[in-house]
């Protein structure tokens, strides 16, 4: 891949998109394109096609999505389904029509059936029912994967889908009403510590198993996919290791230095019992994560502390 290749990163201001931008700059790429949602509404098909006509990107990385945790998915099912399908359909269709040869589509491990065998293999897609609390987002992402697969099959273009496990890291969302479990825990434990180490209440039983990948490692996998022609259309990206939500909570509590009581509210949903990715296909091609979980939590907490003034105005939920 030529370092002057014109690369459009959709969603470049989000946690994942920003990490991809940083990694590409670090790797020496000099022609990166990004537009904020105010500059380009990806839900507007005409605007997206005009953008492609003017900018003529050679590679598209789709890191644009409406994302959130269980609460957000349950509260806004229509938006999670329609916004995500509209965004990705506009990007994929514009890329095809404007002869973009390489497209990297990013999804999520929630595309796999709720009770699929563990670890999750790529071939388990569409073999069972989804987890109800995030099926709207999952259905949207599945349509994106199948669209890229169809283009690959019908037109022979290098369109590939990367499915990361649970992501976290710098520039994460720490709004307790919409954030994922790891950043939400960081904020809860920090604020409890600041308030005299008061108790912290967390959702569920603490027994579900989860896998977490530092966002810079995800970005490195995108660079890897950019610089190599991957032989298949779908790849899992993760660490291949998981831990219980309770173990995660204790690790975060330790990093932050909170010494208060930890309470589990079992009246709240747990979500999928386990979501461990089989990452043997990416490993066989030569990619592997670098940042272990505790180190990643420390990096994320440090960033949170450096940017805490941005979160002060968001009321704790």
Image (cartoon, rainbow, N blue to C red):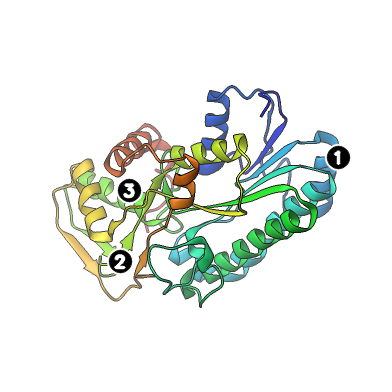
Q: Are marks 3 and 2 in contact (CB under 8 Å)?
A: no
Question: What residue is at 25 percent from the left and 62 percent from the top?
Answer: 201
Percent across and percent down for residue 251 are 22, 48
Circle 3 sits on which residue? 187
Question: What residue is at 73 percent from the left and 40 percent from the top?
Answer: 39
Is the residue 70 above or below the residue 23 in the image?
below
Percent across and percent down for residue 78 are 62, 70
Decide if residue 220 is in sight here.
Answer: yes
> Mark 1 or mark 3, which has the lower sequence index?
1
174 or 124, which is in the foreground? 124
* 1 vs 3, front mark: 1
For marks 3 and 2, give the CA distance: 21 Å
Badge 2, how many Cα within 10 Å: few under 14, some, many 20+? some
Is the residue 267 above or below the residue 284 in the image?
below
* 3 vs 2, front mark: 2
Circle 2 sits on which residue? 208
Which mark identifies residue 53? 1
Is the residue 88 above or below the residue 81 in the image?
above
Picture quadrant of residue 180 = bottom left
Percent across and percent down for residue 150 are 73, 60
Percent across and percent down for residue 16 are 52, 43
Is the residue 134 above or below the residue 220 in the image?
below
Which mark identifies residue 195? none
């Amino acid at each position: 891949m030529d370092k002057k290749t014109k690369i459009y990163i959709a969603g470049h201001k989000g946690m994942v998109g920003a990490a991809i931008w940083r990694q590409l700059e670090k790797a020496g790429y000099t022609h990166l394109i990004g537009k904020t949602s105010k500059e380009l509404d990806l839900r507007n098909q005409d605007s997206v096609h005009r953008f492609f006509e003017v900018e003529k990107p050679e590679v598209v990385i789709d890191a644009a999505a409406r994302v959130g945790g269980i609460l957000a998915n349950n509260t806004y099912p229509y938006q999670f389904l329609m916004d995500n399908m509209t965004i990705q359909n506009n990007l994929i269709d514009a890329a095809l029509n404007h002869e973009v040869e390489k497209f990297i589509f990013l999804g999520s491990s929630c595309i796999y059936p709720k009770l699929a065998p563990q670890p999750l293999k790529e071939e388990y897609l569409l073999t069972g029912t989804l987890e109800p609390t995030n099926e709207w987002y999952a259905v949207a992402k599945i349509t994106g994967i199948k669209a890229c697969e169809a283009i690959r099959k019908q037109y022979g273009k290098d369109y590939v889908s990367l499915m990361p496990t649970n992501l976290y890291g710098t520039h994460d969302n720490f709004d307790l009403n919409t954030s994922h479990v790891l950043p939400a825990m960081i904020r809860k434990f920090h604020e409890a510590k600041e308030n005299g180490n008061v108790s912290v209440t967390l959702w569920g039983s603490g027994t579900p198993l989860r896998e977490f990948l530092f966002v810079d490692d995800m970005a490195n996998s995108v660079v890897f996919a950019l610089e190599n022609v991957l032989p298949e259309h779908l790849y899992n990206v993760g660490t291949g290791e998981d831990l219980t939500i309770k173990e995660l909570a204790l690790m975060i509590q330790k990093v932050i230095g909170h010494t208060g009581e930890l309470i589990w509210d079992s009246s709240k949903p747990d979500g999928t019992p386990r979501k461990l990715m089989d990452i043997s296909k990416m490993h066989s091609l030569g990619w592997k994560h670098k940042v272990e979980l505790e180190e990643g939590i420390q990096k994320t907490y440090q960033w949170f502390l450096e940017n805490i003034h941005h979160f002060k105005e968001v009321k704790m939920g």
